[in-house]
Amino acid sequence: MYRGFERLNVVFTYGVITLTVCVLALNLTTFFKDFSRIETVNLDFKGFSGFIKNSSRYPSLRVDGSHETAFLTLDAEADFQSMFNWNVKQLFVSVVVEYVSPMHARNEVVVWDKIIVREGNALINTNKGSRYMHWDDGTGLRGLKANWRLKWNVIRNVGPMADYQSPAYEIEFPKEYSH
């Protein structure tokens, strides 16, 4: 009555539809989980220190001296273990410094980041310098008020990716250049 190709088409279509329904049902089990809050709130920017240098002191950078470089130290703790479930593949966590300068209305600089792929590595306890050099194309960092902000991106196995962030913590850059 039916040819083999028609039967194979029906079986394949049934399999794809069944798999799609299963994936959507599994996605609904974690779709409403709130990733915007760190449930065990140990997030605390304990300290900030830093020094600023005029970039003309670094001849290998080949700049005209109208740039500043800041080296920042962060002392912070955060616990992301509650974020993990069967549907979370990994978390991308970063610390961002946000500020307004005379040259630009909005500046965001990533000074530290980490990719967390297992729940056992989800406890962040750092007391070290920034991973990346904070470079500003002007001379407005001295005495500038800025905000630290912790940001994280939840990357799921199934479902949408989403970005979240902590409240801002205000800091002030040093008022003089360091030697």
Image (cartoon, rainbow, N blue to C red):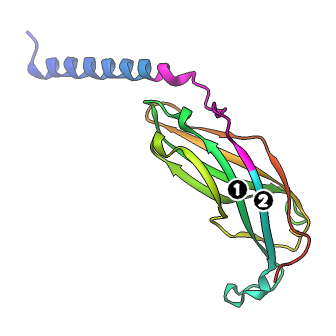
Q: Is residue 37 magenta?
A: yes
**Looking at the image, is 104 positioned above or below residue 90?**
below
- Magenta region: which residues? 27-45
Which element carries disc 2, helix, strand or loop?
strand
Instruction: Give the distance between the C-alpha atoms of the residues marked 2 and 1, in whole angstroms.
Output: 7 Å
Residue 37: image x %, image y %?
A: 67, 32
Q: Is residue 80 magenta?
A: no
**Looking at the image, is 129 positioned above or below residue 115?**
below
Residue 70: image x %, image y %?
A: 77, 71
Residue pictured at 50% horizontal, 23% vertical = 30
Q: Quadrant of residue 131?
A: bottom right
Residue 61: image x %, image y %?
A: 69, 84
Q: Return the residue found at the far bottom.
A: 59
Q: Return the residue found at the far top.
A: 1
Residue pictured at 61% horizontal, 51% vertical = 125
Q: Quadrant of residue 42?
A: top right
Is 70 in front, or is 123? 123
Residue holding disc 2: 48
Residue pictured at 68% horizontal, 35% vertical = 41
Q: Which mark is residue 75?
A: 1
Kind of residue sitting beneath label 1: Asp
Count of numbered tags: 2
Which element carries disc 1, helix, strand or loop?
strand
Q: Is residue 87 left or right of residue 76?
A: left
